[in-house]
Amino acid sequence: MEMRNITPDFILLGLFNHTRAHQVLFMMLLATVLTSLFSNSLMILLIHRDRRLHTPMYFLLSQLSLMDVMLVSTTVPKMAADYLTGNKAISRAGCGVQIFFLPTLGGGECFLLAAMAYDRYAAVCHPLRYPTLMSWQLCLRMTMSCWLLGAADGLLQAVIDHFFCEAPVLVRLACADTSVFENAMYICCVLMLLVPFSLILSSYGLILAAVLHMRSTEARKKAFATCSSHVAVVGLFYGAAIFTYMRPKSHRSTNHDKVVSAFYSMFTPLLNPLIYSVRNSEVKEALKQWLGMCVNLKHQQNEAHRSR
């Protein structure tokens, strides 16, 4: 990212150039993003339509998919338009919008993953008390809190060699002393990452202790299967986020930042629904039922067309 004296806009240098190899990579990335949007939208649709999935766990999962759709939509359309048109300028207002939504969605996802870890703790450690410990009222409050805490983080950061506007990259363009802002941003990111991550570790520590006390091997397998998808998503998300926001300034590299940013803003949203659908029998059953309905509807339309 860079800022030119002749224009008030920022110039996004981009992720790709126009060589044949980069054109192929761009098409692959675009296919990945479209698949991510489709799979997350399908996850939201399945959870909304299938009554068996009307539970707090799947409601939280639908919020995760919604955040992933919004995260991809915040950065990729502008990046794709810049590459295809060659116009890499972004206005200050547009840059501010990206800087607000990225930490809003990223921070919200941090706390949402913590809420999902609590849900798994209640389901595994206290199955008989689960309806009380994870009531719909509490679930809705937790969800609203995740969105509000994420928005608070976005507002704090919203007061470039890159392919979208991101606060750590934007700070490098400033001519004034930014040490105070950088320290505040670093502390904010640490809190937004470590507080929910500590809650997740605590929840899974209690889950692990409960599983180790289970006498039934079948019960242990079921408990591990229930939590494995969430653990995989947490590992992907927090691994990329901690690498991006918690490294010392001396260890930063523009090319590394681009790759990691692409991973957590484009590839992680694709992997989330795949992880939950492949390892979740209820989601797979809902998908089969929905596909069956689509096939039957298409068959009825063909029969009606033939009868005419």
Image (tube, grey):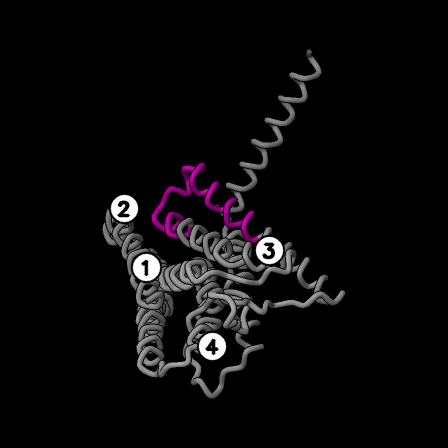
Q: Which mark is residue 151?
A: 1
Q: Residues within 10 Å of mark 3 (few under 14, many from 20)?
A: few
**Which tag, 4 or 3, sits closer to the chain's start?**
3
The residue under the point 71% across, 16% down is 306
Quadrant occupied by the C terminus: top right
Give the secondary structure at mark 4: helix
**Which tag, 4 or 1, sits closer to the chain's start?**
1
**Which tag, 2 or 4, sits closer to the chain's start?**
2
Marks 4 and 1: which is nearer the front?
Answer: 1
Looking at the rendering, the stretch of residues picked out in magenta corresponds to 36-61
The residue under the point 44% across, 82% down is 247
The residue under the point 44% across, 43% down is 47
Nearer-the-camera pick, 76 or 192 = 76
Marks 2 and 4: which is nearer the front?
Answer: 4
Q: Which mark is residue 136?
A: 2
Residue beneath label 4, please?
243
**Which tag, 3 or 1, sits closer to the chain's start?**
3
Nearer-the-camera pick, 219 or 130 = 130
The residue under the point 36% across, 64% down is 107
Separation of marks 3 and 1 at Cα, in angstroms? 27 Å
Instruction: Examine the structure image and report whether residue 230 is included in the region drawn in magenta.
Output: no
Q: Residues within 10 Å of mark 2 (few under 14, many from 20)?
A: some
Separation of marks 2 and 4 at Cα, in angstroms? 35 Å
Q: Position of residue 153 (x, y in %)?
A: 32, 65
The prevailing secondary structure element of the residues shown in magenta is helix
